[in-house]
Amino acid sequence: MAPGKGIIVKVVEKLFREVEGDVAKGVARDAERKPLALPPGRATRSHSQVRNIKDGRTRWQAAEQNARERWGGGPEQSYRTPAGKERKVDCPVQTPHGTVAVEVKMYQRYRRVALADGTSVSQKVEVPLSTKIQDQIDKDIALRNANPRYDPRWEFQGAGPSDELRKYLVDSGIVFIEIH
């Protein structure tokens, strides 16, 4: 062994034992933590299986069912805003702290577009900030302002939000999840 290598090996071994000890302590601490309010659920279909459903209507219905199974949510439910407008929530989850109102968006991530020369290309799709979607967000804000126990969440299971929609959600203080 070259001069000094024995010292280096001993130092490395000592550091390794210290790191192992810290990892073991961390695992023990993690085991003592209380579970989160929404533990991970099990779904009948994976996200990939849902995304691969060809029929659009069947796909978005499967996406909503997937969210209900994972979040432990109930069937679609209507809520009335203080202004009397109806807000249909795809996946309402009742917790001891109130309602987590999950809105599910399932748009395909890509679509084939035919070009003038007869060829086609794949085009990336984003969920736009349409008038209908803006209205849903505005109702979520009104419901949350009227009842702090109403917590809206948006879940994008395919295509993600456009920059405009992303900004509107962030500015509105609505948590959103992108699943790719």
Image: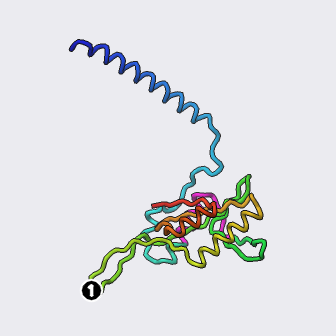
The amino acid pointed to by label 1 is Gly
What quarter of the picture does the C terminus occupy? bottom left
Question: Residue 77 appears at what percent x and percent y?
Answer: 69, 70
Eyeballing the image, is 97 above or below 28? below
Q: Is residue 59 left or right of residue 73?
A: left
Q: Is residue 66 left or right of residue 146?
A: left
Residue at image position (63%, 43%) is 35
Start and end of the magenta stretch?
61-76
Q: Is residue 145 left or right of residue 128?
A: right
Eyeballing the image, is 92 above or below 15? below
Question: Between residues 7 and 23, which one lies in front from this camera angle?
Answer: 7
The residue tagged 1 is 118
SS of the residue at dot 1? Answer: loop
Eyeballing the image, is 17 above or below 121? above
Q: Does the segment drawn in magenta span residue 116?
A: no
Q: Does the segment drawn in magenta span residue 69?
A: yes
Question: Residue 32 appears at what percent x and percent y?
Answer: 62, 34
Question: Residue 20 appears at what percent x and percent y?
Answer: 45, 26
Question: Between residues 170 and 95, which one lies in front from this camera angle?
Answer: 170
Residue at image position (78%, 71%) is 82
Residue 122: quadrant of the picture: bottom left
Question: Residue 143 appears at what percent x and percent y?
Answer: 73, 66
Q: Is residue 59 left or right of residue 103?
A: left
What quarter of the picture does the N terminus occupy? top left
Residue 78: quadrant of the picture: bottom right
